[in-house]
Image (tube, rainbow, N blue to C red):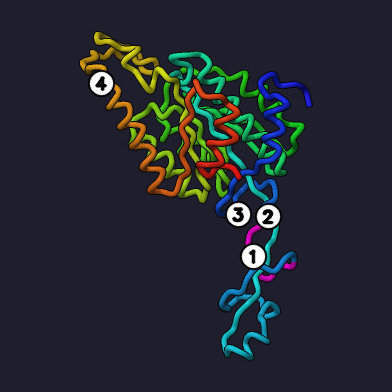
């Protein structure tokens, strides 16, 4: 595999020991990888018993158990099925501010997760949230040797423009035929909360196992160091706003916004993790993401 500068041998060794954490799988349009899940009537590895329902294969009935309990139970088995992994990267203008390395961190996190997914023999695809009718997305990748191509395609994307996350997601789930599998959204979360909520709902109703990673710079977490009053210009809309907050009020508003996103995710069973650019990438991927239920 060609060299990727930030993917050091130390990081690779630690990624090799990790796997994507998958709570459940529902069959979707595009499947990849292998994950053990209980299916009735298969023949790989016995998992458990479940009550018989009309339509179950009668060959799976345990007649010895029926003789003892006078109830019908069928055997279930662990069967390996495929899993698709959607890496959804926010590439709107805010991802390039206040520092250019913010979107680079997004690319690196996606690269690490893509490496783990491909090593696990999953199928991995990246898509980029941005303006315009066309949905930017990579092809499906299936092998670890495909990672440089995934990284190359991401490196060609530059954060720009503005779009409603909910509107983009509504179009993307149809254009990319998302259904089933896992979706990992990597964003700064700098959007109206209702827009974020609706976008996540679009993924959930498509039977996606959704996860969210919020990437922020230290300056965004402590915005008082950037804004001392006066006017600010929205990088995505171009609109000018009069900033009337005090430093403490501004920081409280940012904290409240981020907590609102995190609470929504918690209520809806969506693992949520926040990454700061002043923390090492390796620490976030190999320690924070396993602790937040993304990896195991």
Mark 2 vs 3, N-terminal side? 3
Residue drawn at (56%, 20%) of the image: 104
- The residue mark sitting in front, 3 or 1, is 1
Principal SS element in the magenta part? strand
Q: Would you say the residues marked 2 and 3 are in contact, meaning their CB atoms lie under 8 Å apart?
A: yes
Q: Is residue 227 above or below residue 1?
A: above
- Per the image, the residue denoted by label 4 is 248
Q: Is residue 93 above or below residue 258?
A: above
- Per the image, the residue denoted by label 3 is 27
- Per the image, the residue denoted by label 1 is 39
Label 4 residue SS: helix
- The residue mark sitting in front, 4 or 1, is 4
The answer to whether 257 appears left or right of 8 in the picture is left
Please indicate, yes or no, whether residue 8 appears anywhere in the rendered image: yes
The answer to whether 287 appears left or right of 152 in the picture is left
- In depth, the one of 126 and 176 nearer the eye is 126
In the image, which residues are magenta? Answer: 36-43
Mark 2 vs 4, N-terminal side? 2
Asked if residue 284 lies in the magenta stretch, the reply is no
Q: Is residue 177 above or below residue 110?
A: below
- Per the image, the residue denoted by label 2 is 81
């Amino acid at each position: 595999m060609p060299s990727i500068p930030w993917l050091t041998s130390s990081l690779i060794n630690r990624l090799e020991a990790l796997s994507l954490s998958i709570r459940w799988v529902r069959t979707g349009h595009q499947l990849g990888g292998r994950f053990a899940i209980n299916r009735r009537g298969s023949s790989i590895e016995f998992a458990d018993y479940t009550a018989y329902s009309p339509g179950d294969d009668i060959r799976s009935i345990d007649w010895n158990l029926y003789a003892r309990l006078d109830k019908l139970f069928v055997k279930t088995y662990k069967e390996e099925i495929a899993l698709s992994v959607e890496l959804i990267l926010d590439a709107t203008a805010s991802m390039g501010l206040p520092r250019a390395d913010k979107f680079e961190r997004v690319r690196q996190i996606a690269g690490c997760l893509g490496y783990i997914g491909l090593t696990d023999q999953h199928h991995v695809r990246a898509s980029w949230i941005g303006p315009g009718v066309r949905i930017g997305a990579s092809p499906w990748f299936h092998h670890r040797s495909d990672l440089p191509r995934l990284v190359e395609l991401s490196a060609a994307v530059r954060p720009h423009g503005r779009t409603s996350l909910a509107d983009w997601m509504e179009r993307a789930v149809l254009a990319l035929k998302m259904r089933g599998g896992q979706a990992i959204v990597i964003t700064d979360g700098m959007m109206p909360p209702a827009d974020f909520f609706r976008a996540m709902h679009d993924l959930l109703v498509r039977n996606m196992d959704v996860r969210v990673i919020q990437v922020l710079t230290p300056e965004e977490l402590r915005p008082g160091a950037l804004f001392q009053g006066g006017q600010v210009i929205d990088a995505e809309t171009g609109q000018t706003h009069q900033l009337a907050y005090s430093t403490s009020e501004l920081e409280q508003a940012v904290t409240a916004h981020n907590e609102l996103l995190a609470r929504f995710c918690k209520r809806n069973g969506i693992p949520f993790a926040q990454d700061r650019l002043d923390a090492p990438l390796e620490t976030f991927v190999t320690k924070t993401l396993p602790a937040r239920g993304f990896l195991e």
